[in-house]
Image (tube, rainbow, N blue to C red):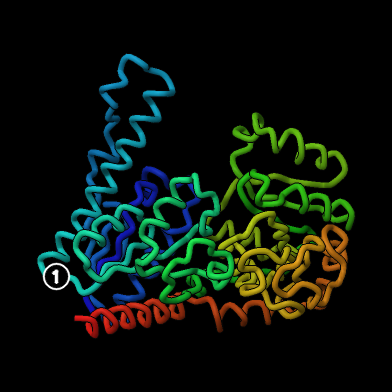
Amino acid sequence: MRIGLLSPSIYMSPSRYGDMIFAPRDLSVFLANGLVKRGHDVTFFTAPDIQTHARLVGGDRQLLEKQYQEEKLEHAGGERQKWASFYTVKRNYELDLTTRAYQMAKEGKLDIVHSYHDSLAHFFDELTGFPTVYTLHDPVPKNPNSLPFWLLNRFKKHNFIAISKSFGRLDGIGLNFVGTVYHGIDLPQIKGVSPGLYLACAGRMVPEKGIHLALDAARTAGLPIKVATSVMKENQNSEYFNGIVKPYTRDVRVEFVPFMKNAQKTEFLASARAFLFPIVWEEPFGMVMIEAMACGTPVIAYNRGSVSEVVRDGFTGFIIDPDSENRPGKGSWIIKKQGIEGLVEAIGKIDQIDRAACRKHVEENFTVAKMVEGYENVYEKVRLRISSCL
């Protein structure tokens, strides 16, 4: 199959935005290389400095490297011009790459376009009718006054791929989901080490990630915790950090570390006794959960979003109801206590989890090969359906 994999976000560039946590970067590279390995002809429309086995069509380096300014706002200067210039460059960079993808499609060089992280493709899809599928990485928006809601509602009949089944459960727009494909990781690159005594937590320093809840649970359990998070200098002015997180640091042995990659991340996760994931939002997938389990580290997580699809309760960790609210699976978990009490009880029972079973769970469900196979099935399904309508 001739596949155009479209991941045009300016954040895909590892040389320009390598320090930024941007999950679609590694995932789309894994997918491109995996599809090539399976014998497909893959054209990857993305950053020009991405290393891939696919045919690379890179974005305009000038838009990445030069400091173009929004001329109309020169008189404004300051932050207004800075951000207006950045988002104008970002839009033009991504629009240029999306145009290249559909130009190849128009020339008969592609069989399908897979928009992996791009909203502009919807307009080209609408205009051309070319077979296109979209992977959604963020939860379906609920606010009718938000731009993402307007966009998805406008194009809700397009072909969407969810990264978890919870997407459908939480979809209030009525999107045309044509499949669910879980993320996968490159397992050979992840090796476990002997577990340590500390608890681990990771995420941006924002309320949704529940870092304050992880610290509260660690304090109550009497165990040290390491938190991989945003650059701490940036957090000094954060209302969430100063008002909610920081007070816990007086009563718990906590170490904040920056986000890590590759071997450093593996060591951080694999050396932990357990990984805490008490999220306060409907997490669409949660890559860090499968990364932790791949290292052999069990996960203790609140029952939100995709958690119950990723963690096997009592086998690769424990799922905790965050509150008394009705939600799928409520009351069926091994730990019956809710909230912080549930997290603490799970921490006390974490040695019951077989770390080898955590690794095996990922091997059986969340590999690159599984992800590639899932997307292949969706591509074929969409192509067959469109062919039957012609």
Which type of secondary structure does the marked residue at label 1 adopt? loop
**Residue reaching furthest to the top:** 75
Q: How many labels does the image show?
A: 1
Q: Position of residue 319 (x, y in %)?
A: 75, 70
Q: Is residue 380 left or right of residue 187?
A: left
Residue sitting at x 41%, y 65%: 135
Residue 160 image-quadrant placement: bottom left
Quadrant for the C terminus in the image: bottom left
Residue 333 image-quadrant placement: bottom right
Residue sitting at x 69%, y 54%: 280
Residue 353 image-quadrant placement: bottom right
> Do we see residue 244 in this rendering?
yes
Q: Position of residue 174 (x, y in %)?
A: 47, 66
Q: Is residue 308 left or right of residue 365?
A: right
Residue sitting at x 69%, y 44%: 256
Q: Nearer the viewer, residue 179 or 7?
A: 179
Q: Where is residue 159 in the image (x, y as percent from the top left)?
A: 36, 69
> Do we see residue 53 in this rendering?
no
Estimate how packed mark 1 is, as few (under 14), some (14 to 19) or many (20 or more) residues with alpha carbons within 10 Å: some
Q: In this view, does 63 lie above or below 3?
A: above
The residue tagged 1 is: 109
Q: In this view, does 63 lie above or below 329?
A: above
Q: In this view, does 386 lie to the left or right of 303?
A: left
Q: Which of 216 and 88 is in front in this view?
A: 88
Quadrant for the N terminus in the image: bottom left
Q: Position of residue 252 (x, y in %)?
A: 85, 46
Q: Is residue 176 above or below residue 369?
A: above
Circle 1: residue type = Lys
